[in-house]
Image: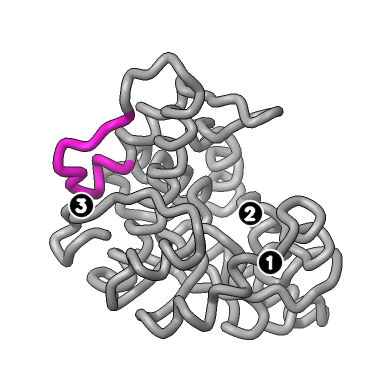
Amino acid sequence: MVDAAGRLRRLELAQHDGDLLDALPPSEVVAVDAPLAVPNDDGQRDLERVLAWCDAPPFPASRQRLRRLHGRLRGVDLAPSLAATGDLVEAAPDLVLRQLAWERRRAGDAEPLELGAYREEWLGVRAPAYRPKGRARARPAGLSPAADLLGGVLDLDGWGPGERADDAGALHDAARLDALACAYVAHLLATRPERALVLGTTERGRIAFPADANLRERVRINLERLREDGQVAI
């Protein structure tokens, strides 16, 4: 949880659904790193199709895929309870961090790039890799770079990834970074909505992420084209 000034107020690990809901206070915006609406049994959701055309694809979500990987649709199941605490949106930490890396690279550039130049430069920007790979093995080398990007836009109040030799500590810090990326999205929507973009609908999937003029324009172009072609209904 961050306050209106962007300062970290709480950062807790909660495993079970009840613990998660108990730890969540009423908030203006609640951002979650999980699909909250998945109308499709297979394939892609509309928001994923649009973002894929923007070279910013989130993890593809379908009911079959989520049940196969996780055994359930946890975000979908929790969405009604989460929505009771505040305006509820999905967030994608990788896209959040990638946009932050982009904004840091382009700091001071007021004018948007020509579309082709933007795409070429955007493809060279990557979010730090810190999540488990393979059999839940940690990737600690990416923790500090990710924390540095988030610390540039939030006051983390002294928090940073711990120096731990075991996988468990690094995996927990990866989960904390995901939560902080979501908190930043919620903070933008609550305090500086002009710096964020919301894509989709509550029924078909609704995601929010930081966006500059370049990303906004690319989303607009691809969303209009996909709507005209009948490929999306958002």
Which residue is drawn at the image coordinates 31% and 47% (left, top)? 109
Q: CA distance from mark 1 to mark 3?
A: 29 Å
Please indicate, yes or no, whether residue 133 appears anywhere in the rendered image.
yes
Residue 165 on image: x %, y %: 43, 14
Q: Identify the element where label 3 is drawn.
A: loop
Say which amino acid is labelled 3: Leu
**For the point 38% across and 49% down, which residue is it?**
13
**Majority secondary structure of magenta residues:** loop
* Mark 2 vs mark 3, CA separation in Å: 26 Å
| Magenta part of the chain | 150-161
Residue 82: percent from the left, percent from the top? 45, 76
Crowd class of label 1 (few under 14; some 14 to 19; many from 20; radius 10 Å): many
Question: SS class of the residue under badge 1?
Answer: loop
| Residue 158 among those drawn in magenta | yes
Tally the numbered discs. 3
Q: Could you say which disc has been placed on residue 50 in the image? A: none
Report if the CB atoms under discs 1 and 3 are less than 8 Å apart: no
x 53%, y 68%: residue: 207
Quarter occupied by residue 3 = bottom left
Specify the amino acid type for callout 1.
Leu
* Callout 2 crowding tier (Cα within 10 Å): few <14, some 14–19, many ≥20: some
- Residue 73, numbered circle: 1
Q: Are marks 2 and 3 in contact (CB under 8 Å)?
A: no
Residue in front for this viewpoint, 30 or 198:
30
Task: Please give left or right for residue 136 compared with residue 149 in the image.
Answer: right
Q: CA distance from mark 1 to mark 2?
A: 17 Å
Where residue 50 appears, as percent x and y from the top left, is 68, 65
Looking at the image, residue 165 lies above or below residue 12: above
In this view, the residue in front, 84 or 141, is 84
Is 180 on the left-hand or right-hand side of 199?
left
Q: Which residue is mark 2?
A: 58
